[in-house]
């Protein structure tokens, strides 16, 4: 997860250094996806701390929503690109950020799955 956070930080710094800006719509998509991933990861850690299987199951469902968000972001990005609403350079950064966010949510699922597996093994 730290590697993905570092990747996102580097992409943000690259955006600042190269004066890359996103449309309001793209920025809102990134914020929405970030918030969903943050919640997913927070719940995964809480499920691990408390051995809460129900919360772990919620993490898995939330990650499915993140996958849907990622696909939607990619489709919306292609529309913006086709309509000349963003540049290729902006698009590369945008796609890299959403890919890294999605991978963080995948790792949250790995944590949740271990909580569930541990619960099953204890029975």
Image: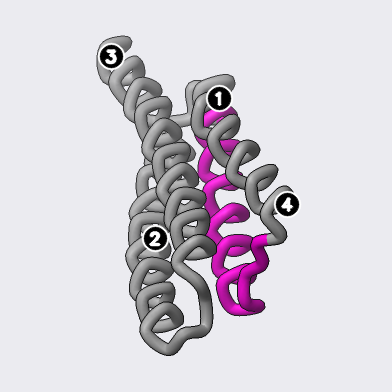
- Taking the magenta stretch, the answer to whether it contains residue 73 is no
- Closer to the camera: disc 4 or disc 1? 4
19 lies above or below 48: below
Is residue 97 toward the left or the right of residue 71 in the image?
A: right
* Residue at 55 percent of width and 24 percent of height: 2
Q: Which residue is mark 1?
A: 2
Numbered disc total: 4
116 lies above or below 62: above
Measured in 3D between alpha carbons, the distance from the residue under mark 1 to the one under mark 3, in whole angstroms, is: 33 Å
Give coordinates of residue 104: x percent, y percent: 46, 37
The secondary structure that most of the magenta stretch takes on is helix
* Residue at 72 percent of width and 48 percent of height: 17
Q: Which residue is mark 4?
A: 16
Crowd rating for badge 1 (residues with CA inside 10 Å; few <14, some 14–19, many 20+): few
Give coordinates of residue 107: x percent, y percent: 41, 31
Give coordinates of residue 121: x percent, y percent: 26, 12
Crowd rating for badge 2 (residues with CA inside 10 Å; few <14, some 14–19, many 20+): many
Measured in 3D between alpha carbons, the distance from the residue under mark 2 to the one under mark 4, in whole angstroms, is: 23 Å
Place residue 65 in its image quadrant.
bottom left
23 lies above or below 8: below
* Residue at 59 percent of width and 63 percent of height: 32
Give coordinates of residue 16: x percent, y percent: 73, 52
Q: Could you say which disc has been placed on residue 123 in the image?
A: 3
Disc 3 secondary structure class = loop
Magenta residues span 20-46
């Amino acid at each position: 997860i730290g590697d993905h956070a570092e990747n996102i930080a580097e992409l943000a710094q690259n955006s600042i250094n190269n004066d890359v800006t996103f449309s309001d719509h793209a920025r809102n998509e990134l914020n929405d996806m970030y918030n969903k991933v943050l919640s997913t990861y927070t719940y995964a850690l809480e499920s691990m701390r408390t051995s809460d299987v129900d919360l772990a199951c919620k993490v898995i469902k939330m990650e499915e929503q993140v996958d849907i968000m990622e696909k939607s972001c990619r489709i919306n990005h292609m529309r913006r690109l086709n309509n000349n609403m963003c540049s290729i350079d902006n698009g590369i950064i945008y796609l890299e950020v959403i890919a890294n966010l999605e991978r963080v949510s995948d790792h949250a699922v790995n944590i949740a799955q271990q909580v569930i597996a541990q619960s099953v093994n204890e029975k």
